[in-house]
Image (tube, rainbow, N blue to C red):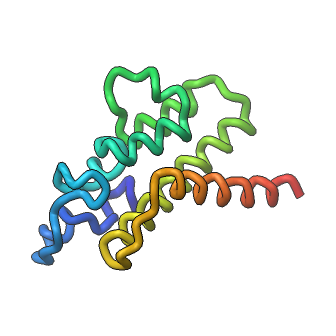
Amino acid sequence: MMFHGGLKTADMLALRGIMVPRLCPFCHADLESNTHLYFECIYTFDIAKRLFPWMNNLFMRPNFYQVFDSIFEQGFDIKTRNNYLLIASAMIYYVWRARNDRRFGNTIDSKATIIAKIKKAVLIKALRWKK
């Protein structure tokens, strides 16, 4: 959904005539969009830097296509590469859930909590792969 612009961010809802608060629920500084929510937002980029250490060395923030490409370009073995691909997918899911919790549930998870949820989900899935 994220790669095809299918996430119902504020900008996409506005195109359909549905008006919702336009500011990003994480940074409250920029307008929420698919591209902003993942990596342009300082809050979510901090999460990404904790999950993908090589992003600390980037001069510019990547988009999600570039993140997936960078996982393949790092030269990881297949197992490590698959783990990072799973982490990236889990990040999409848990950032979106945290966004919805903030918008609709009045629940605000910290960056550390979101990262912990991602790591837990990835660990549970990876343990199932070993069986």
Quadrant in which the C terminus appears = bottom right
Instruction: Residue at 72%, 54% (x, y): give it.
Output: 123
Specify the quadrant of the image occupied by residue 90.
Answer: bottom right
Out of 90 and 105, give the one closest to the viewer: 105
In the image, is 126 to the left or to the right of 34?
right
Instruction: Residue at 26%, 64% (x, y): give it.
Output: 9
Instruction: Residue at 18%, 50% (x, y): give it.
Output: 30
Using the image, determine if residue 120 lies above or below residue 49: below
In the image, is 18 to the left or to the right of 88?
left
Out of 111 and 72, give the one closest to the viewer: 111
Instruction: Residue at 67%, 44% (x, y): give it.
Output: 83
Using the image, determine if residue 77 lies above or below residue 14: above
**Image location of residue 15, percent across then percent down:** 13, 68
Count every numbered label the image shows and give the total.
0
Out of 45 and 19, give the one closest to the viewer: 45
Using the image, determine if residue 15 lies above or below residue 118: below
Specify the quadrant of the image occupied by residue 120.
Answer: bottom right
Quadrant in which the N terminus appears = bottom left
**Image location of residue 100, percent across then percent down:** 37, 71
Using the image, determine if residue 109 lies above or below residue 30: below
Specify the quadrant of the image occupied by residue 71.
Answer: top right
**Image location of residue 72, percent across then percent down:** 57, 31
